[in-house]
Amino acid sequence: MVTCTFLLQPTSSVVPKAQPSPATTIRYIERSLPQGIAHILLIPANSPFVVTGALSPTVNNVEEFAQKHQATAIFNAGFFDPANQKSTSYVVVAGRQIANPKDNERLVNNPQLKPYLNQIFNRSEFRRYLCGQITTYAIALHNESLPKDCSLVDAIGAGPRLLPQLTSEQEGFVDKTKGRDALGTEQPNARTAVGITRDGSVILVMVAQKPSQPNNSGISLVQLAQLMKTLGASEAMNLDGGSSSSLYYKGKAIYGKFDLQGNFIKRPVKSVLLVKPR
């Protein structure tokens, strides 16, 4: 896998030679950042793993999702309303839409959000297509048409798009005329993202805060976009962040947000991205 060879400096003192063939196994990397810790999972395009979605009737933490789905890895995904536990993002699993933000009455009837509903209902989503016998991934706006001769297998909405450019204003997260910034775009926070490389590999990232600096650590959206680009992503989008930022890998759950005492916040979420054997 091309992206694996240049993403990060090897932890060993021995520099590996160029691989004769692309990597086929997923790879986990932990990387120290100036204000946080990046947990990175690389899923090569030709690996025996697939990235799909899951939605829970009630909110669950990533460990509970792991028990149910027996996935190799799990990352938190779409937005939701903690008050009514309903999704505020579209979710499609196995070709069937199982969550529609238009069904969330607290979202639709919120007077502060009414001016942005058209943008909210057309935010970025991570998609998995089946084009003939070939599985491909893409990031597209919800209303965007499918590629020719492809069917939509899975999709989880969130946003905004990070690459090739940040679209916070277009997707209704930021309104400079009214001082709206729903995600604290320029502020450090725990955040989660998904990216796709030019060869079709998937990069999942969760940036955790530093327990010693819960009020001023993590990563901004602008920095997150740059990180995804550095990791080799040509397309990328933001997932739900803050207290929702969490992942599960090889029997261990990692949470990204910390309270003032330096304890991680174990917040249950509504939807996740699963990494599972094909």
Image (cartoon, rainbow, N blue to C red):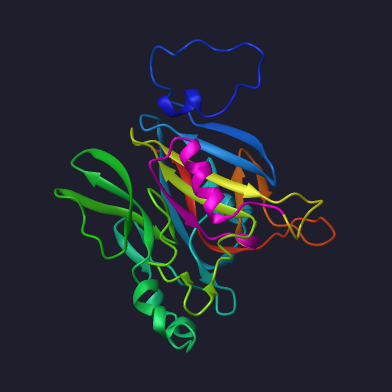
Whether residue 216 is in magenta: the answer is: no
Percent x, y of residue 44: 41, 31
Whether residue 233 is in magenta: the answer is: yes
The extreme left residue here reads 149
The extreme front residue here reads 177
Q: Total label count?
A: 0
* Residue pictured at 34% horizontal, 54% vertical: 154
The extreme right residue here reads 261
Where residue 251 sits, quadrant-wise, is top right
Percent x, y of residue 234: 38, 41
Q: Is residue 113 above or below residue 213?
A: below
* Residue pictured at 39% horizontal, 21% vertical: 22
Q: Is residue 110 left or right of residue 209?
A: left
Q: Is residue 165 above or below residue 2?
A: below
Q: Which span is picked out in magenta?
A: 217-243
Placement of the C terminus among the 4 image quadrants = top left
Percent x, y of residue 141: 32, 61
Placement of the N terminus among the 4 image quadrants = top left
Percent x, y of residue 223: 56, 49
**Does residue 71 appear in the picture of this structure?**
no
**Does residue 22 appear in the picture of this structure?**
yes
Q: Is residue 201 left or right of residue 250?
A: left
Q: Is residue 81 above or below residue 15?
A: below
Q: Is residue 69 above or below residue 201?
A: below
Front-most of residues 62 and 106? 106
* Residue pictured at 53% horizontal, 38% vertical: 41
